[in-house]
């Protein structure tokens, strides 16, 4: 006997209101602590006499540390406890974030950023895997889209907050140091809260009525069985598969476009415009407001139509087009800013739909390992994007060549997404149906 639509609707709504806002808040804190270096750099490099190359390497080296614990972290979420692992991650990275505010040399900056990446490793793939335990496949892109908006809202919030903090000089410490110290505290607090708030699996959720809990458990088990019938892969078999490697390369290239922009945009805007730090931090929120809308619109429309490939590739191609326009209007600050705003909307919008792909055709263990592997390779893109821009800026005295590097990456990523159809056509039923 099938459960009534009311049971399904109520269970889905209850889970959405209970879990998604909290996960969104955790990811907002994570991204705020990851990207705050972009705003701190408005004063930090000058105070410590860092070149663009030094800052680019320090900003990007976060992602090298991030790679180390990605796969083990995601597997622990799958087979042990999401609640405990995510709590551990948050407390650790909160402490390390505060320590970044105490650096004085390039070597200390590199070390602190590396440790911060290692501390945060496993968080995002852990969240993606965690959603598999609560959200059905057909609604997963929308759920990921909602959580992913935290990355842009973090910049919307962090940008105007950074302005007043940068002017502060408390206890003999400069404002840029306080950005790191103050923004590390929420991670520690919410890491402790996570231990008591997040249940690992639906059967542990006392706030779900038994009938709704049974329905959700049955639905997710049916999904798991269907995937097991269509594809059964071990961890290593999953990682060796061509689709997984191709998705990893796509995410690497896309991450160049995301993090190269995120970590350098405030500095680029300040140098090109000559605006004050306060003005830059206020205007710096605009691209991320647009990105929030782009993420939501693309994720919702993809779920509504059931199409994934073009929603991912199209966002990447449009981002490349507006980045090219931003380079063309390099001498017209307001036109360039407008192009950067639209660019941000598209470059962030590809992510939630992209993350609906790897979890759709692998079994539980294979999906966990694959998501972590893809995110790890993408994290190296987070290193390459900021570093290459900083290196080329130091060598040439302009950001034009660095932006050209991002343009190439986005076009290549979009092309690789379009090639996924040929590889997946004989794959999992769900992807074949949606393409």
Image (cartoon, rainbow, N blue to C red):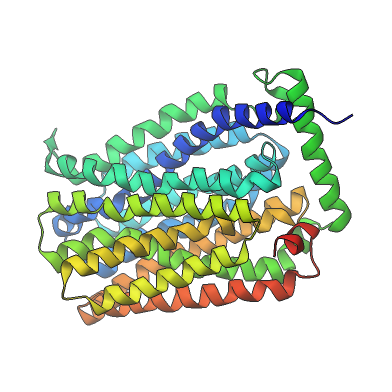
| Quarter of the image where the C terminus is located | bottom right
Q: Is residue 69 left or right of residue 340?
A: right
Residue 115 showing in the rendered view? no
* Front-most of residues 236 and 329: 329
Residue beneath the point at 73% across and 26% down: 7
Is residue 380 rendered to the left or right of residue 56? Answer: right
- Residue 256, compared with residue 159, is above or below; it is below
Q: Is residue 311 visible?
A: yes
Residue 269 location (% of width, % of height): 20, 63
Give the image location of residue 39, x and y in percent.
Answer: 25, 51
- In the displayed structure, 406 sits above or below 220; it is below
**Residue 192 in the image: x percent, y percent?**
49, 25
Residue 131 spot, x, y in % from top left: 63, 41
Quick check: 188 left or right of 36? right
Q: Decide if residue 177 is on the left or right side of residue 239.
A: left
| In the image, residue 197 above or below residue 29 | above
């Amino acid at each position: 006997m099938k459960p009534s639509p009311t049971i399904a609707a109520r269970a889905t709504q209850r889970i959405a209101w209970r879990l998604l806002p909290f996960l969104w808040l955790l990811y907002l804190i994570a991204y705020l602590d990851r990207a705050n270096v972009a705003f701190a750099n408005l004063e930090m490099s000058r105070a410590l006499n860092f070149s663009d190359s030094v800052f680019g390497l320090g900003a990007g080296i976060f992602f090298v540390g991030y790679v180390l614990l990605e796969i083990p972290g995601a597997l622990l979420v799958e087979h042990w406890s999401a609640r405990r692992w995510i709590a551990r991650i948050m407390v650790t990275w909160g402490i390390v974030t505060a320590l970044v505010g105490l650096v004085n040399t390039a070597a200390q900056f590199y070390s602190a950023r590396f440790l911060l990446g290692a501390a945060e490793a496993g968080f995002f793939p852990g969240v993606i895997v965690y959603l598999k335990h609560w959200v059905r496949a057909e609604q997963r892109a929308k759920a990921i889209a909602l959580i992913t908006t935290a990355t842009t809202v973090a910049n919307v919030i962090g940008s105007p907050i950074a302005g007043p903090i940068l002017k502060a000089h408390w206890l003999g410490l400069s404002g840029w140091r306080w950005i790191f110290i103050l923004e590390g505290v929420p991670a520690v607090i919410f890491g402790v809260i996570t231990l008591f708030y997040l249940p690992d699996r639906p059967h542990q959720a006392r706030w779900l009525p038994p009938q709704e809990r049974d329905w959700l458990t049955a639905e997710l088990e049916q999904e798991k069985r269907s995937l097991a019938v269509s594809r059964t892969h071990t961890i290593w078999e999953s990682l060796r598969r061509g689709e997984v490697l191709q998705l990893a390369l796509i995410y690497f290239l896309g991450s160049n476009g995301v993090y190269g922009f995120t970590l350098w945009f405030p500095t680029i805007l300040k140098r090109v415009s000559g605006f004050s730090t306060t003005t830059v931090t206020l205007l710096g929120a605009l691209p991320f407001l647009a990105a929030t809308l782009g993420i939501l619109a693309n994720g919702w429309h993809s779920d509504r139509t059931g199409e994934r490939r073009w929603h991912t590739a199209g966002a990447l191609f449009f981002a490349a087009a507006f980045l090219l326009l931003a380079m063309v209007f390099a001498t017209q600050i307001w036109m360039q800013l407008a192009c950067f705003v639209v660019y941000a909307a598209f470059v962030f919008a590809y992510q939630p739909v992209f993350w609906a792909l790897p979890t759709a055709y692998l079994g539980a263990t294979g999906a966990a390992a694959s998501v972590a592997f893809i995110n790890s390779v993408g994290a190296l893109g987070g290193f390459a994007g900021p570093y290459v821009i900083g290196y080329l800026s130091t060598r040439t005295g302009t950001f034009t060549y660095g932006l050209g590097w991002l343009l190439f990456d986005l076009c290549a990523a979009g092309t690789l997404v379009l090639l996924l159809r040929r590889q997946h056509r004989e794959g999992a039923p769900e992807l074949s149906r949606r393409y």
